[in-house]
Image (cartoon, rainbow, N blue to C red):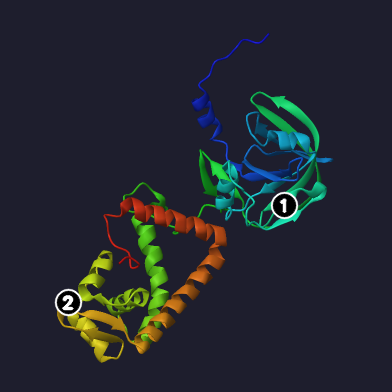
């Protein structure tokens, strides 16, 4: 008999969390035809010939009898946009299939939409796996898409993106050294990317005769009108631009703003002409964004935006957003 080993279960769970996995939902039907589904990341491939996969379920799971009583089940490999669906099927005590479009697969098993892949399986064998039961199934039918998968690592969801070859911005070795200001300096990368993006937007500003500060004013008012000069300054204090009542009056004289009252507390609203010009520039900026996303790849762009939001959140001293009241 092997020696009994005592380990810290929480520490063991954390150690296993270092292995990055995909996220799946396993579905079947109970004996009375009720659709059953659970979220699981204990999925793996077994064989190509014959095509076989495995997954495991806790002995304490209330869904276990349904999977033991039905030889057919489906594995849904979730896409990066299905985090909410994963959370939904990870909970118990609710109708997980309510209002979801469901197809019927082999053995009448329920199939969910918009997944990376769906594998319809028939149980080949079950194994005792400690506090889990391991199901090995033969894949009878499958379908898949090119959507990137939802990923789980260290107890958190993650995004899967392709890792490109190392990129160097300069041929000068000094740029990659340990100097305080090199191509890996976050401040340089953020500033360089901002100015290169904004330079393209500025080409459209020049055609309208607007400067940066005037464009910021119009942009804020396009989101929500009825703001004062003081309000606009509060919302865009992080830009380093300062709006004055004289700038507001200049925009009004050009037919772009309507001002009610006087001074920095006067109410500012876009005129129809002001709104048309602003929306035209915003549309041009969105077109520039689409071009960048096409070059980066959709999920790389999603990852970039997620990281930037985290950066803003972590460094935010409490500044307002243009959408705030």
Asked if 297 appears above or below 153 in the picture, the reply is: below
Of 149 and 192, the residue lying toward us: 149
Q: Which residue is nearer to you in this view: 211 or 187?
A: 211
Identity of the residue furthest to the left in this view = 263
Going by the picture, which residue comes out furthest to the right? 50
Q: Is residue 247 left or right of residue 277?
A: left
Dot 2 corresponds to which residue?
264
> Could you say which disc has been placed on residue 111 in the image?
1
Q: Is residue 24 above or below residue 200?
A: above
Give SS at disc 2. Answer: helix
**Which residue is more in the foreground, 246 or 188?**
246
- Quadrant position of the N terminus in the picture: top right
Q: Earlier in the sequence, mark 2 or mark 1?
A: 1
Q: Nearer the viewer, mark 2 or mark 1?
A: 1
How far apart marks 2 and 1 lie (CA) works out to: 59 Å
Percent from the top left, x then y, of residue 312?
A: 35, 56
Residue located farthest toward the front when viewing the structure as drawn: 32
Q: Quadrant of residue 16?
A: top right
């Amino acid at each position: 008999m092997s020696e009994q080993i005592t380990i810290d279960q929480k520490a063991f769970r954390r150690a296993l969390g270092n292995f990055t996995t995909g996220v799946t939902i396993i579905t079947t039907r109970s004996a009375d035809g009720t659709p059953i589904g659970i979220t699981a990341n204990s999925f793996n491939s077994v064989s190509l010939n014959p095509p076989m996969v495995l997954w495991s379920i806790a002995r304490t799971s209330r869904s276990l009898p349904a999977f033991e009583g039905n030889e057919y089940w489906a594995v849904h490999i979730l896409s990066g946009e299905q985090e909410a669906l994963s959370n939904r099927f990870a909970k118990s005590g609710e109708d997980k299939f309510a209002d979801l479009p469901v197809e019927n697969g082999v053995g009448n098993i329920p199939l969910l939409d918009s997944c990376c892949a769906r594998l319809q399986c028939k149980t080949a064998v079950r194994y005792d796996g400690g506090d889990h039961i391991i199901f090995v199934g033969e894949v009878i039918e499958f379908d898949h898409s090119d959507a990137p998968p939802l990923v789980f690592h260290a107890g958190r969801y993650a995004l899967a993106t392709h890792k490109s070859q190392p990129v160097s911005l300069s041929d000068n070795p000094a740029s990659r050294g340990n100097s305080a200001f090199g191509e890996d300096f976050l401040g340089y990368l953020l500033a360089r990317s901002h100015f290169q993006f904004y330079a393209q937007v500025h080409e459209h500003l020049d055609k309208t005769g607007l400067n940066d500060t005037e464009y910021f004013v119009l942009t804020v008012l396009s989101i929500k009108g009825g703001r004062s000069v003081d309000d606009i300054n509060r919302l865009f204090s992080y830009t380093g631009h300062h709006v004055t009542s004289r700038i507001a009056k200049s925009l009004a004289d050009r037919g772009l703003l309507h001002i009610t009252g006087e001074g920095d507390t006067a109410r500012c609203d876009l005129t129809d002409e002001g709104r048309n010009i602003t929306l035209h520039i915003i549309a041009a900026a969105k077109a520039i964004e689409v071009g960048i996303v096409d070059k980066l790849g959709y999920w790389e762009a999603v990852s970039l935006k997620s990281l930037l939001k985290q950066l803003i959140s972590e460094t935010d001293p409490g500044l307002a957003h243009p959408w705030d009241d």
